[in-house]
Image: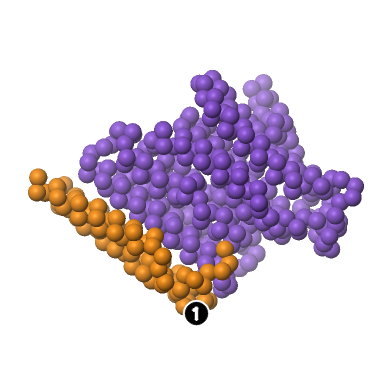
Chain colours: A orange, B purple
Amino acid sequence: MLIYDIWFLFIYMFFIGNLIFVSKNKHLLVVLLSLEFIVLSIFFFFLVLLMFIDYDMYMLMVFLVFSVCEGSLGLSILVSMIRSHGNDYFQSFSML
Amino acid sequence: MFFFILTNNNSNKMFFLFILFFSTLISISSNSWFGCWIGLEINLLSFIPLISNSKNLLSVETSLKYFLTQSLASINFLFMILIKFSLLKNFDMNNIISIMMNSSLLMKMGSAPFHFWFPNIVEGLSWMNNFMLMTWQKISPMILLSYYFNKNFLIFMIIMNLIIGSLGGLNQTSLRKLLAFSSINNLGWMIFSIMISENLWLFYFLIYSMMIFMMISLFFLMNMYFMNQLFINNMNFFIKMNLLINFLSLGGLPPFMGFMPKWIIINFLLINKFYFLTFIFMMTSLIIIYYYIRIIYSSFMFNYFKMKWMNLFMKNNMFLINLSSFISISSMILSTFIFM
C-alpha cells in the first residue's frame, strides 16, 4: 500500500499548480510558471507510471518535447505582450 | 481564406495553416489518447502564429487569452488521460474521470460553462481567423468527445450551451460576438448530435460550417464588424436578401438549408421521448431567430435609417453572393432529388 501514497503527491502538485494558474496574479510570468509546475507534476507522474511498464521512457521524452514547445510559445507571447504594452501586468488589459 | 493569404504576401501563414490541418488529422486518427493530446498541442502551436500577426494591443491580448485557456485545457486533459491509464478505466464511461476529460475538451471548444474566453477572443480576431476558430478548431475536440463521453454530464452541458448561447447574444452590437454566441448555441446541437451518431454530427458540422462560411465571407467582403455599419446608404437589394436568408438559415427556419440537420435531431428527440430537451432546443432557437431578425428586418422597410455614407464595391462578388443565396434556399428541396 505504500506505493499508492505517491499518487496523492501527484494530485496535490497538479491541484496546487492549477490553483496558482487560476488565481489573481499581478504578473503574467507567474501564470506561465504555474503552467510549468503542472507540466513538472505530470512529468513525475508519467515517470512513475512508465516505471511499471518495463522502463519504456520514450513516450516521456515526446511529452517533454511538446511541453517545452508549449512553454516557449507562452514565453514568446509574453515577449510580444511586453513589446506592445511595456509590462506584463494583467491590469493593463483594457480591450476585451 | 487561401486567396486572402496569398494577396497579403503571407506565405508563412500557409505553412501554419497546413500544420493546423495536419494536427487535426493527427488527433482524430491516433491509436492512443496520448496521440490525441499531441494533436491538440500541435493545434495550439500552429494556431497562435496565425492570430498574432499585427503589433497592436488587441491582437496580443487575444493570442494571450487563447493560449492560456487552451494550454490549461490540454494539460488537464493529459493528466486525466494518465489517471485513466493508471486506474485502467478504459471502457467505463460513467465515472468522474470521463467528466474531467469531457470538461477539458469542452473548454477547448469554447462550450458553456467554459465559454467566457470565446466571445472575448472572437472580438479581437479578423473575420477569416474567426472562421477558422469557429469551424476547424471544433473538429478535433468534438471527435475526441465522441470517443469517451459521459451522457448525463453532456446533456447538462448541452442545456447550458443552449441557454447561454441564446440569452448571451441578446445584448450584443458587435457582429463577431453575435456569431460567437450563435456558435455556442450550435455547439449544443452538435454535442447532442454526437451522442446520436457520428454521421449525423458530420452532417450537422458540414452544413453549419457552410452557413458560417457564407455569413463570414459576406461580412468580410463588406468589411463590417458592428451592427451600426449595416445602416448604409446604397446597400444592394441582393446583399440584404442574402443577409436575411443566411441569418434565417443559421437560425434554422424551415425552407432554408439550416433547418435540415435540426430537423433530424428533433426527429430523434421526439421518437425517443426526450420531451423536456426538445422544449429547451425549441425555445432557445426562438430567441436566436429573434435577435437575427432584429438586425436586418428594418432594412426592408421604406423608411430605412441610412445613417452612414459608404460605397461598397461588390460588383465582382455578386455572382458568389447570389449563388450562396440560391444554395441556402434550395438545398433542402434539391436534396430530395438525390434518390431519383
A6 left or right, relative to B117: left
> What's the amino acid at mark 1?
Gly
Report crowding for label 1: few under 14, some 14 to 19, many 20 or more residues within 10 A (C-alpha). Answer: few
Is residue B329 in sight in this rendering? yes
B87 left or right, relative to B65: left
Is residue B215 or residue B326 the one in the foreground? B215
Is residue B249 or residue B317 the one in the foreground? B249
Question: What residue is at 58 percent from the left and 67 percent from the top?
Answer: A95
User: In the image as oriented, which residue stretches furthest toward the left?
Assistant: A2
Quadrant of the frame with the N terminus of chain B: bottom right
Res B253 → quadrant: top right
Is residue B261 in sight in this rendering? no
Mark count: 1
Question: What residue is at 54 percent from the left and 24 percent from the top?
Answer: B275
The residue tagged 1 is A86
Above or below for B322 versus A63 = above
Q: The residue marked by circle 1 belongs to what chain?
A: A
Image spot of residue B33 (x, y percent)? 33, 45
Is residue B303 or residue A35 the one in the foreground? B303
Quadrant of the frame with the C terminus of chain B: top right
B1 left or right, relative to B226: left
